[in-house]
Image (cartoon, rainbow, N blue to C red):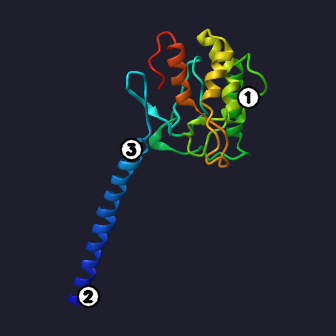
Amino acid sequence: MARTLLVALRACLLTLAVTGLAYPLAVTGAAQLLFPFRANGSLVSDEKGTPVGSELLAQGFANPAYFHPRPSAAGNDGYDPTSSGGSNLGPTSAKLRERVTSDAAKLLAENPEARGPVPAELVTTSASGLDPHLSPDAARWQIPRVARARNVDPSRVRGVVDALVEGRDLGFIGEPRVNVLLLNLALDRQFGRPEGMAAAK
């Protein structure tokens, strides 16, 4: 019996050392060596070098001079990276219909010069509630509002959007997209920050 317990204890300690210490240290070291930006959270900094967010996580923008991301159901007030998740409301949910209808009306009021209907992704949350991207069409739909708020020609804002469109991964996976945080930071760099505003974050 004692021999069996000793063998089991040795196996347990070896497994703990390999899977609980050696493997995590090796993976962390390799990640820091090969992909330090990704391994450290893909943090994005403003022109002063101050971190303002992660390019992997959406954050809310209320100022009309910034592009707005998808709505978020992550946390009580949305955009909470410690509480990632969707609303779990289905297509038959009256609560979901009411929220979408209310959000669509608000978007139309805020974007009176926008062409076409409100893009679906601007009134629907992602599964994580933290999707940092919009489709190019959803970003372009907001251009008139952003251009008016910044007092610049819409074609100049469109140029910034078009320059930041990310293609499909490996040329065929996913859809073209625009990272909202990177887009708003690019606007600040090119046109300056809106009056009385801190850096986009």
| Label 1 to label 2: alpha-carbon separation | 68 Å
* Residue designated by label 1: 118
Amino acid of disc 1: Val
Amino acid of disc 2: Thr
Residue 58, position in %: x, y? Answer: 53, 35
* Residue designated by label 2: 4
Q: Secondary structure at mark 2?
A: helix
Q: Of marks 1 and 3, which one's residue comes earlier in the chain?
A: 3
Amino acid of disc 3: Pro
Residues at badges 2 and 3 in contact (C-beta under 8 Å)? Answer: no
| Label 1 to label 3: alpha-carbon separation | 38 Å
Q: Is residue 166 visible?
A: yes
**What's the residue at 47%, 26% (across, down)?**
201
Quick one: label 1, few (<14), some, or many (20+) residues within 10 Å? some
Quick one: label 2, few (<14), some, or many (20+) residues within 10 Å? few
Q: 74 or 42, which is in the foreground?
A: 42
| Label 2 to label 3: alpha-carbon separation | 45 Å
* Residue designated by label 3: 36
Task: Note whether 9 is above or below 102 in the view shown.
Answer: below
